[in-house]
Image: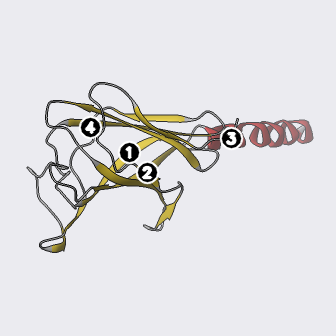
Amino acid sequence: MKKPIIVIIFIAATIISPLAKANQNCTYLVEIQTSCAPSAETTDHISLRFGDAAGSLITVKHLKNPKLVYDPSHGLKRHGSGYGGFIRCGIDMFEASGECMKQSVCSLYLKRVGSDGWRPGWVKLFKQEKEGRAMPVSYMFYFRTFVPANVWYGLNYCKP
């Protein structure tokens, strides 16, 4: 009697374990450099959408609370609450969470809502590992142009 129960438990663990891993949530770090062009900075509401070739997609409705900033006039520094990011020539890092991507991130879109305008230079994504390291998981997405208002605007390098 004991053998069939052990076999059933083993089979259930073998089937359920990969399914549980596929639905795990991951934390991604989004690094965004705002261009050094005149009037590149913004206080507009910025959203982000990124995905992989397998069809996984994560949408962040509002990028806020940057964790780390590179301010060209002061070097690397941490900002407290009240800093919204997206200063001219600055590099901001934001957290995004969602279902773990099965492949590298190959599409990235930005959406700007507001009246300032904004000119990002580039965007890169990293996956936060358990050990505290951040591993790159995307191409470098170069924009270097103003993002139009109220539409998803971006790049898709995914192969069909």
Give the number of the disc on residue 46. Answer: 4
87 lies above or below 75: above
- Give percent across and percent down for residue 118: 23, 43
- Mark 1 belongs to which amino acid? Ala
27 lies above or below 99: below
The one nearer the camera, 56 or 36, is: 36
Real-space Cα distance between discs 2 and 1? 5 Å
81 lies above or below 56: below
Q: With 67 as the anchor, is 30 left or right in this view? A: right
Please tell me whether mark 3 or mark 4 is closer to you in this view.
Answer: 3
Element assignment for label 3: loop
- Toward which corner of the image does residue 37 lie, by quadrant? bottom left
Can residue 30 be seen at all in this image of the molecule?
no
Element assignment for label 4: strand
Give the number of the disc on residue 28. Answer: 2
Whether the residues at callouts 2 and 4 have beta carbons within 8 Å, the answer is no
Identify the residue under disc 3: 159
Residue count near mark 2 (Cα–Cα under 10 Å), binned few <14, some 14–19, many ≥20: many
- Mark 4 belongs to which amino acid? Ile
Real-space Cα distance between discs 2 and 4? 17 Å
Q: With 64 as the anchor, is 97 left or right in this view? A: right
Residue count near mark 3 (Cα–Cα under 10 Å), binned few <14, some 14–19, many ≥20: few
Q: Earlier in the sequence, mark 2 or mark 4?
A: 2
The one nearer the camera, 26 or 42, is: 42
Q: Earlier in the sequence, mark 2 or mark 3?
A: 2
Q: Earlier in the sequence, mark 1 or mark 3?
A: 1
Real-space Cα distance between discs 2 and 3? 22 Å
Whether the residues at callouts 2 and 1 have beta carbons within 8 Å, the answer is yes
Identify the residue under disc 1: 96
